[in-house]
Image: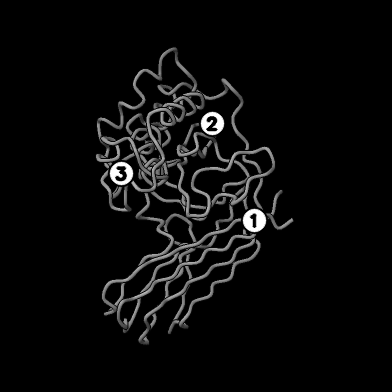
Amino acid sequence: MPLYHVTHHTRYRHRSSATAAWQSLRLHPRDEPVQHCEGFELEIRPLPADLTSRPDVFGNRHHLFTLREPHTELAITSRSLVRRDEPALPAPGSTPSLAVARAEVSTVIANGSHFSLEQFLHASPSVPLLPAARELAAGLEAGDRPGFEWLAALGARFGKEFKFDPEATTVSTPLAEVLEHRRGVCQDFAHLFISCVRQHGLPAAYVSGYLLTTPPPGKPRLRGADASHAWVSVFLPGSGWIDYDPTNTCFVATGHIVVARGRDFSDVSPVKGLFTGGGAHTLATAITVVPAN
């Protein structure tokens, strides 16, 4: 089970003095069946007046703090030690077809055994259910293709139709614009993939996290390293949640570190908050994920 050191630096610089700050952080990697966070440190400068931590509704570790002294710079650094294993994937041909999977999802929601799945089937603040997004999977259901293979085929289509371009979008670019220009970053592709999958009847969640900065020898460097990354998690009856990275057209592996899960980016933003005063500010981030053994 590989062990990784993860460092995430965030720095705000203000044009003039800010008198107070209220910040919300989701930087603590999750504990999951194939992942365990063995250590976590949070350093904040200037020191906050208070700092609290609690789980949110999705099971993510949520930190909140208040800064009540004048400052022109706020620096937030998290350091994590994470053990990550290879997720088990379904055997080829072992998952039900999309039509059968849809019916089974409806049944488990109706009987109350997995009622929480329903929130991942509908539109959410950053994921409108656009008809054009649904059409991205047109023709992929032919021949009762198993659900797992359907996901792989949809990902391959994304890889052909969309181009990774860090200059094409911002955090607030509408999904319809991403569809029109066929360019964007991991957040855009995750939201678009989710919109498509939900409209085909499968619950889909947004996952924020990190990628291994330098891949093992012989492995390609994935798009999205050196920054917060995003991918999707799709629920397939009989197999559970399966994570897929549409930016890199691959199912996730040991080099994907999970930090938070939610309906879309608005649920899992790594750092967000408010300032009093300060005028305009700049925000800079730096992330490294390196093997610890």
Q: Quadrant of residue 87?
A: top right
Q: Nearer the viewer, mark 3 or mark 2?
A: 3
15 sits left or right of 29 in the view: left
39 sits left or right of 62 in the view: right
Q: Which mark is residue 127?
A: 3
Find numbered disc 1 in the image and state the secondary structure of the residue it sits on: strand
Sequence order check, earlier mark of 3 and 2: 3
Name the residue type under label 2. Gly
Crowding at mark 3 (Cα within 10 Å: few <14, some 14-19, many 20+):
many
Residue at the disc numbered 2 = 238
Residue at the disc numbered 1 = 290
Do the numbered discs 3 and 1 sit on residues whose CB atoms are within 8 Å?
Answer: no
The percent position of residue 261, horizontal first and vertical second, equals 46, 51
The percent position of residue 61, horizontal first and vertical second, equals 49, 63
Do the numbered discs 3 and 2 sit on residues whose CB atoms are within 8 Å?
Answer: no
Sequence order check, earlier mark of 3 and 1: 3
Cα separation between marks 3 and 1: 32 Å
Which residue is found at the position 53% from the left and 25% from the top? 95
